[in-house]
Amino acid sequence: MNILLTAAGKVAEFETYTNLLLQKLFDGSLFIVRKIIIVLLIWLIGKKLIKILQNFLSKTFDRAHMDISLSKFLLSLSKFLLYAVLAVSIISAVGIETSSLVTLIGSLGLTVGLSLQGSLSNFAGGVLLLLFKPFKVGDYIVACGCEGTVQVIDLLYTKLATVDNKTVTLPNGTLANSNITNVASEPVRRVDISIGVSYNTDLKKAKSVLETVIRKNENVLTDHDIIVFVDALGDSSITLTTRCWTASEHYWDTVWALRENYKEAFDENKISIPFPQMDVTIKQ
């Protein structure tokens, strides 16, 4: 009889433990299911909010006529940051402590930043160039000892095409901290050309010849000032300087044509252009 009672007690105890285990498994399953549902809800709602915010930022950048390279970069950066915030929110909702994770990410970011100082400087320079726009693609600029037509403005580098068809790549960090001359920023440019004549030249005639040549050039803007004046009295010549205006895209064609036409006109009018000479005396 005692054996039967003992066995019945063991069975009841086993059933109790089994019920407790099943209850814990059930509660744990419900907890996991709730966490999964919460994570899915945060993920779906977060994605929807990120998409709405991205569309809002895109329309704002379009209305502000922001440079396409800068707007794409800012949209990508904002998307990355928003998804990072969403990931941290999900981890926090699961119940994982996020303070150590944030500290780890911060330390990793500092390490990467120190190892990529040059690239970060170029990156910051690229943002400044795209934001303040000292020049744009197609402009002819002079900077960092180089000059050429801007072909590409990236976030790290700017590429120029020189007049002899070479490609010059300039780091944006250096470029943003340098003096930049944008030759093509204005629609018209002044053409200054100096030419020397001998001291026995009739200056009025020489100036008249030069002015006639200027007015015949089709690229010269006749509604702007045309000036011919004595610029300097040199050791062996008088320097005459001409000033006129032309469209920026015709600048070099105008310079080259006027230089050639000046020489031809002086030859036709018997006006000499002095050049250095040396007299050598040989003693016998």
Image: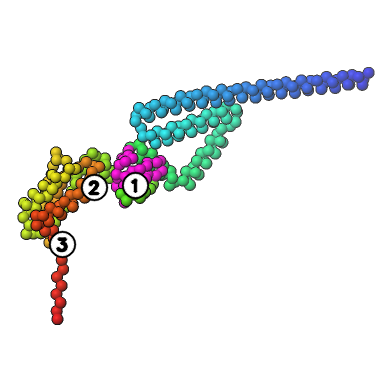
Label 3 packing within 10 angstroms: few (<14), some (14-19), many (20+): few
**Which residue type carries mark 1?**
Ala
Whole-angstrom CA distance, mark 3 to mark 2, is: 25 Å
Check if residue 147 falls in the magenta segment.
yes
Mark 1 highlights which residue? 161
Q: Which stretch is magenta? A: 133-159
Q: Is residue 248 left or right of residue 273?
A: right
Q: Residue furthest right?
A: 1
- Residue 214 screen position, x and y as percent: 14, 46
Q: Is residue 228 left or right of residue 106?
A: left
Q: Residue furthest bottom?
A: 284
Front residue of this view, candidates 155 and 165: 165
Q: Quadrant of the C terminus?
A: bottom left
Residue at image coords 56%, 32%? 98
- The location of residue 15, given as percent across then percent down, is 80, 20
Q: Tag 1 or tag 2, which sits nearer the N-term?
A: 1
Question: Which residue is at 26% across, 42% downward?
Answer: 184
Type of residue at label 2?
A: Trp
Residue beneath the point at 14% across and 40% down:
222
Marks 2/1: CA distance?
Answer: 16 Å
Q: Which residue is mark 2?
A: 252
In this picture, residue 223 sits left or right of residue 88:
left
